[in-house]
Image (tube, rainbow, N blue to C red):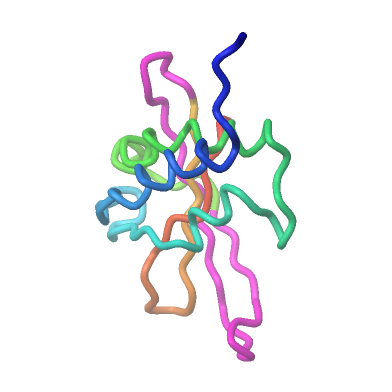
């Protein structure tokens, strides 16, 4: 019989790794990137709906590469600015895409950070192979 791990245990394993991530300086955006529960939640859910198991695992497997990807990227590859409603207020939200080749197989990984307002902090938003 195959050794299987259930989804909750799998998510829990990566949640523990994610919780240990400390803020890291990004040369590309010239500021620190912080990690909060919203960033981890986005690896599991998209627009309030749970991601497919395959998509979720693809993202969770990249959690150990978040810090190297942020540190190794020296310039953002894409910036998107949107107006979003947060806590009932319409605010400017800026997304920065940072790409870097990291890991044993030198995979191209894209980390997205999110900054709310003009002077807000940068928070981890998502990671994917690119």
Quarter containing the C terminus? top right
On whether residue 106 falls in the magenta region, the answer is: yes
Q: Can you name the residue that lies furthest to the front here?
A: 1
Residue at (53%, 49%) from the top-left corner? Answer: 126
Residue at (74%, 56%) from the top-left corner? Answer: 49
Q: Is residue 24 above or below residue 66?
A: below
Q: Can you name the residue that lies furthest to the bottom here?
A: 88
Q: Nearer the viewer, residue 24 or 76?
A: 24
Quadrant assignment, res 88: bottom right
On whether residue 34 falls in the magenta region, the answer is: no
Quadrant assignment, res 92: bottom right
Q: Residue 47: image x %, image y %? A: 72, 61
Image: magenta residue range: 79-107
- Identify the main secondary structure in magenta: strand
Q: Is residue 80 above or below residue 16?
A: below
Residue at (60%, 37%) from the top-left corner? Answer: 7
Q: Residue 62: image x %, image y %? A: 47, 33
């Amino acid at each position: 019989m195959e050794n299987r791990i259930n989804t909750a245990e799998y998510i829990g394993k990566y949640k523990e790794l994610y919780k240990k991530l400390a803020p890291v300086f990004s040369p590309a955006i010239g500021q620190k990137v912080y990690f909060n529960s919203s960033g981890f939640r986005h690896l599991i859910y998209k627009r309030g709906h749970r991601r497919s198991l395959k998509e979720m695992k693809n993202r969770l497997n990249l959690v150990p590469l978040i810090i190297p990807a942020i540190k190794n990227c020296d310039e953002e590859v894409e910036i998107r600015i949107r107006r979003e409603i947060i806590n009932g207020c319409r605010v400017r939200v800026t997304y920065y895409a940072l790409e870097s080749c990291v890991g044993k197989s030198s995979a191209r990984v894209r980390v997205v950070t999110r900054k709310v307002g003009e002077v807000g902090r940068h928070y981890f938003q998502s990671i994917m192979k690119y």
